[in-house]
Amino acid sequence: MSDTIFSKIVRREIPADIVYEDDEVLGFRDLNPQAPVHVLFIPKQSLATLNDATPEQATLLGNLLLAAANYAKQEGFAEQGYRTVINCNEDGGQTVFHIHVHLLAGRRLHWPPG
Ligand code: DGP
């Protein structure tokens, strides 16, 4: 498994604006935000893409989503709404190969995304 910029954020080797942390998940603000709220939720253990996830990691994947939902509730925009996205590989637009859930909120998000 290759090291990524996100592994370095987990190890605090490079700075990030961390807004959420538990035993297995880290949440930090995206460097290139696409909405007023744009937070990335990542597992602390390295997992490159959704394609690489195993059944044993099902709970971890669920916990990434729950961390995003709980953050939305805590920050008070859950009822207004938000979007969670996992990009996978080239056509999905994935650029960092450490799986992450994008949490986007704070403006009306268009669908389909294009
Ligand atoms: P994706 O395209 O789904 O792989 O999203 C990667 C996101 O990661 C992209 O929106 C920009 C963000 N990003 C890339 N490098 C850094 C970084 O060093 N710090 C932070 N906070 N975000 C980063």
Image (cartoon, helix red, strand yellow):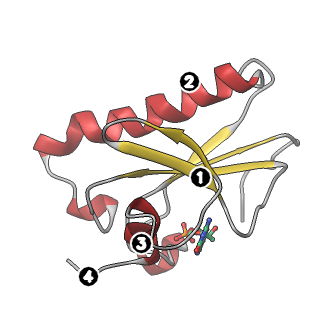
Packing grade of label 2 (10 A; few <14, some 14-19, many >=20) is few
Q: Position of residue 18 (x, y in %)?
A: 59, 50
The residue beneath circle 2 is 70
Packing grade of label 4 (10 A; few <14, some 14-19, many >=20) is few
Q: Is mark 1 within 8 Å of ligand 1?
A: yes
| Residue 41 to residue 72: above or below | below
Point 41% across, 39% down: residue? 64
Packing grade of label 3 (10 A; few <14, some 14-19, many >=20) is few
Point 47% across, 65% down: residue? 9
* Secondary structure category for the residue under label 1: strand
- Identity, as a three-letter code, of the amino acid under mark 4: Ser
Mark positioned earlier in the residue sequence (1 or 2): 1
- Measure the alpha-carbon separation of dots 4 and 1: 21 Å
The residue beneath circle 4 is 2
The residue beneath circle 3 is 8
Point 11% across, 42% down: residue? 56
Camera-near label (1 vs 2) is 1
The residue beneath circle 1 is 28
Camera-near label (3 vs 2) is 3
- Measure the alpha-carbon separation of dots 1 and 3: 13 Å
Point 65% across, 55% down: residue? 17
- Measure the alpha-carbon separation of dots 3 and 2: 25 Å
Labels 3 & 2 near each other (Cβ < 8 A): no
- Measure the alpha-carbon separation of dots 4 and 2: 30 Å
Q: In this view, does 11 lie to the left or right of 90?
A: left
Q: Is residue 68 left or right of residue 79?
A: left
* Secondary structure category for the residue under label 2: helix
Q: Is mark 3 within 8 Å of ligand 1?
A: yes
- Measure the alpha-carbon separation of dots 1 and 2: 14 Å
